[in-house]
Image: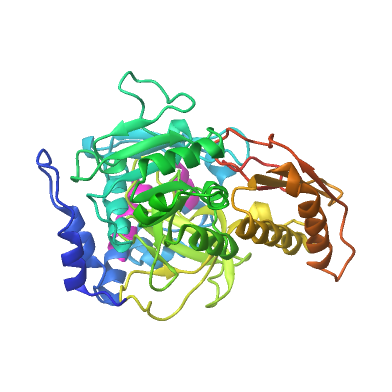
Amino acid sequence: MSTNPTTEKEANSAWKLHPSYRGPALHEQLAANEHRSAEDLRNLQSRAIRSLLEHCYDLVPYYQKLFADLKIRRRHLRDSGILRELPALDKETVAANAEQLRPRYLTPEQRETKTTHTSGTTGQPTVIHHDRRSMGMFPWLKQRELRWFRYDPMGSLLSIRPDIEMAKTPQGNYLKKREILTLDSWPYASGLFQTGPSWGFTNTNSIQDQVEVLNKLKPNYLLMQSSGLEFISLQEIDDGALRNLRAVQGVSSTLTPQMRGQVEGALKVPVHQDYGLNEIGIVAARCPEGGRYHVHEEHCHVEIVDEQGRSCDSGRKGRLLVTALANYTMPLLRYDADDLAETTEGDCKCGRTLATFGAVHGRYRRTAYLPEGTFERWGGLQSTVYALAQEQLSAVRKYQAYQDLSGAMELRIDCDESIFDDLSASCKRSYAEAYPTIPAPPLTVMRSTEFKGEGGRKFQNFISEFTPERDE
């Protein structure tokens, strides 16, 4: 579906601002930006980058030293392209220089309003300070992507997520097991837009309990971590719940094409995704028409570079670097997201002119050092599980593969006893055949209801000791 200013203005009209809101209608400006000329968008980004660089040059000790070491003077900042001369900023550097990344002075508007944390993949999470503008962009960008997904704001929403990522109960407590949180609006739009009702349910509940809640509430929209969507798609869901469901959104982790096909085929609705970082906020959203990610250029600047830090050619995979344009309280320039993504070229068929990047291939640290053939064999195991799920709904509830330092894998499956022997044999066969170039390391298959990392913020269905850091 091609879009234009008229289609987006009409789609935006369904989103009514809350009567108590008295600020500017930022969502209208965001919609207008989406079809501006490429030159106009480049100029907008250049001005934002120059302003941020000047702030860093004048007030942020870490960057003052960096600019001096690189012999960058203030006059050089007139060209926003100087940003590419800076080295990438990784999590370790942020952790080691957290105080030096804070400016010596902030205006009242720039004084921090909230903190988030790095993901903790390299050890103790680092506190990231955000100012009012940085945090304030979240609900507007969330509304933009839901408009792109053509969500009806008056529909109902069910979120199944970790308890710390959801609203607390009226008593100020986290949700208990099997407790349903009922809200009269969508949590991330509360106080800004008028919406329909929403419910919250923790992902530490059993998959059977999650299906029971989905069947009972019959929401129009479902929000879950990508692995959770995968597991719920393996279950038998009532026809009434499926008829009410209009779309689902996968968050927090990569949704592979194979997983997307499984979820969309089972739930019979499209799966939508965005891309964000705790340290930055929402970075981009996957275009329903073009399949690429559109960058929220008002909020951040994205680059994809090779191992030498050079811009990647179109269609190539590279490291994803993000510059936060709205956060002056703790500026992150060319922040290495530790993710691999593809570059794109040309216009997106949806008609939007915002910058884009292609498929996200997951954490670099989780993919760069894996033994040859690992992902091919892992894909073979997933295909076997999906094939069985299509034949016997709810026979498989959850699964996880673990790879040790010898390369051997252990596959744990929560499944019915009656199918285990056949499933185990099929998994071993697909595992051996998936990558015949070199002999496959041993595979052990077992029935289990216990999984590594269960109860954490992000459940991983594949864990390798070759990438031992936490991925939360």
Task: Assess whether residue 104 is covered by the magenta stretch.
Answer: no
Residue 241 % position (x, y): 40, 49
- Quadrant that contains the N terminus: bottom left
Vertical arrangement, residue 129 with respect to residue 299, above or below: above
Vertical arrangement, residue 71 with respect to residue 311, above or below: above
Task: Assess whether residue 59 is covered by the magenta stretch.
Answer: yes
Residue 355 % position (x, y): 38, 69
Which residue is at the front of the view, 471 or 409?
409
Q: Main secondary structure of the magenta part?
A: helix
Q: What coloring was used for the rendering?
A: rainbow
Vertical arrangement, residue 172 with respect to residue 351, above or below: above
**Which residue appears at 63% of the width and 64% of the height?**
307
Which residue is at the front of the view, 259 or 111?
259
Residue 192 % position (x, y): 19, 43
Residue 143 % position (x, y): 27, 53
Magenta region? 46-66
Which residue is at the front of the view, 47 or 10?
10
**Which residue appears at 90% of the width and 63% of the height?**
439
- Quadrant that contains the C terminus: top right
Residue 281 seen from this side: no
Toward the right, the furthest residue is 439
Q: Left or right: where does residue 394 sit relative to residue 171? A: right
Toward the top, the furthest residue is 171
Q: Left or right: where does residue 28 sit relative to residue 233? A: left
Residue 375 seen from this side: yes
